[in-house]
Amino acid sequence: MKHCIVYAFIMMVMAGCDSSKGSAPASEPPVPKVQTEFSTSDKSILTNGNIEVASNRLLTASGDSWGAIKKTSLESISKSPYSNMGKLHKVSGEVYKVEELPPSMGLKGQWSEALMLAGNQNSPLGASSIDCVFHGSPDAIKSGRVATCTGYFIGTFDSANAMGGSVEALVFVGYAKKGR
């Protein structure tokens, strides 16, 4: 008799767990894992998640060490993108477009973007496009002027050029400062 009761109990529990009968409680969706470290194995900003890591670090970092960052050549970054991922750099170039980024990107606060061109001997064109995503207003940065971007190198993306081909842009997240 005892065995029959245990068997009946097990059958009731199993029937209650059968989701096809609709009696099991709905499970909650998995909580997405927040990336806290830079990806150094994927250089595409479209898939590596580094923009979120860099923007969060930028907003929580102390500004004391930013002034000590030395200017970096684009040639050294483009030759070794994986070992430069997530490191702080200072680069300069001539701004050809600047604009505010949409809030739909999910970054905290106001963010803007300055697109610049700078010499790069490692590029077949002799220059590279720099995409500087920076915290703040785009008002101080002007097209046709030189600007300096100090920030985390987060990867690259391919962009169409005027000749119908594509060019690889180097992307940084940090601060932009107007130049001369």
Image (cartoon, grey):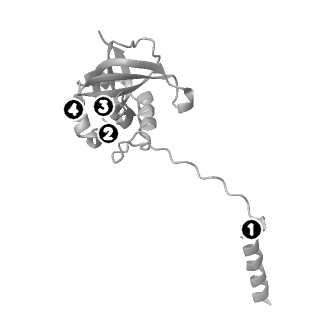
Numbered marks: total: 4
- Would you say the residues marked 3 and 1 are in contact, meaning their CB atoms lie under 8 Å apart? no
Look at label 2 and name its amino acid: Met
Secondary element under disc 1, as helix, strand or loop, is helix
CA neighbours of label 1 inside 10 A, class few (<14), some (14 to 19), many (20+) = few
Q: Which label belongs to residue 20? A: 1
Alpha-carbon span between mark 3 and mark 4: 15 Å
**Does residue 87 appear left or right of residue 5 in this picture?**
left
Considering the image in quadrants, where does the C terminus appear? top left
Name the residue: 22% across, 39% down.
79
The residue at which mark 4 appears reads as 75
Name the residue: 37% across, 36% down.
158
**Does residue 33 appear left or right of residue 38 in this picture?**
right
First along the sequence among labels 1 and 4: 1
Compared to 38, does 103 lie above or below?
above
The residue at which mark 2 appears reads as 85
Q: Nearer the viewer, mark 4 or mark 2?
A: 4
The residue at which mark 3 appears reads as 88
Alpha-carbon span between mark 3 and mark 1: 53 Å
Look at label 4 and name its amino acid: Glu
Of 156 and 106, nearer the camera is 156
Name the residue: 29% across, 20% down.
93
